[in-house]
Amino acid sequence: MRLSKIRLAGFKSFVDPVTLNLPSNLVGILGPNGCGKSNTIDAVRWVMGESSARNLRGQAMEDVIFNGSSARKPVGLASVELVFDNTAAQLAGPYASYAEIAIKRQVGRDGSSKFFLNGSRCRRRDITDLFLGTGLGSRSYAIIEQGMIARLIEAKPEELRASLEEAAGISRYKERRRETETRITHTRDNLARLADLREELA
Ligand code: ATP
């Protein structure tokens, strides 16, 4: 699955709607200091569900919204859409047959965040689930930032294992197992409470 387009509007320095076309597997973004190169990477991370403003080099989530310049007033909404080419059907599950997968996130000044999958409103979780085990995702190894190679070399065995599991596509199943175990624990607790109530009533 290849990222083919990034559509930005009101996101950080990208105040006007713009579409960045990524025409091949290898794309370089060049430009002077402060022109917005890192902002495009922040945008990719943000749509994938990044929930920490600090990881997006800000203090609060609203900091991703264009906050004005000497020539422009601030805007009220930031929106980023990523379009993936899925013609090789690399994405498993219900979206395998879609030639294009578009994921979008919007945030307003009131902090309200909305996610969309191929135009339909969805939860943040639907987006993170979609990419689990593909190597993509807001904190996965698909985005290699400064210092990451050093962090991987120095990583503890369990941290390294998490990266290997993501690469092997296992993390999706581990997450499902964790959720199922939590549900089983809740169900056991409910059954125990039910047994107590039955005893009291008997
Ligand atoms: P460098 O080469 O120095 O790393 P860069 O091209 O990666 O630079 P970015 O960090 O992507 O630059 O962009 C920095 C610019 O984005 C700064 O001019 C900053 O004022 C602007 N910027 C960041 N957040 C916002 C925002 N919310 N509203 C308006 N402008 C913003």
Image: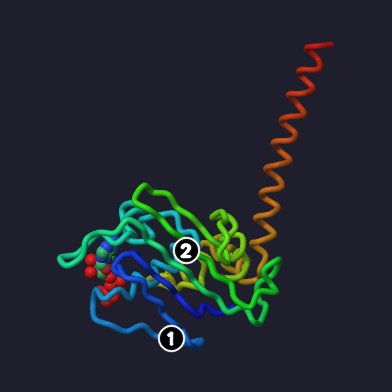
Task: Classify the position of the N terminus by image quarter.
Answer: bottom right
- Disc 2 residue type? Val
Residue 75, x across and y down, in percent? 29, 59
List the single residue furthest toward the right. 202
Q: In this view, does 202 lie to the left or right of 41?
A: right
Query: Would residue 72 be visible to someone looking at this image?
Result: yes
Q: Is residue 41 left or right of residue 130?
A: left
- Real-space CA distance between mark 1 and mark 2, rounded to the nearest whole angstrom: 20 Å
Q: Quadrant of ligand 1?
A: bottom left
Task: Classify the position of the C terminus by image quarter.
Answer: top right
Residue 36, x across and y down, in percent? 30, 73
First along the sequence among labels 1 and 2: 1
Residue 5, x across and y down, in percent? 47, 78
Front one among 93 and 66: 66
Query: Would residue 138 be visible to someone looking at this image?
Result: no
Residue at image location 65% in from the left, 55% down from the top: 175
Query: Which SS class for mark 1?
Result: loop
Q: Name the residue under label 1.
A: 27
Q: Mark 2 points at which residue?
A: 47
Q: Which mark is residue 120?
A: none
Q: Is residue 57 left or right of residue 106?
A: left
- Disc 1 residue type? Val
Count up the numbered dots.
2
Residue at image location 53% in from the left, 66% down from the top: 103
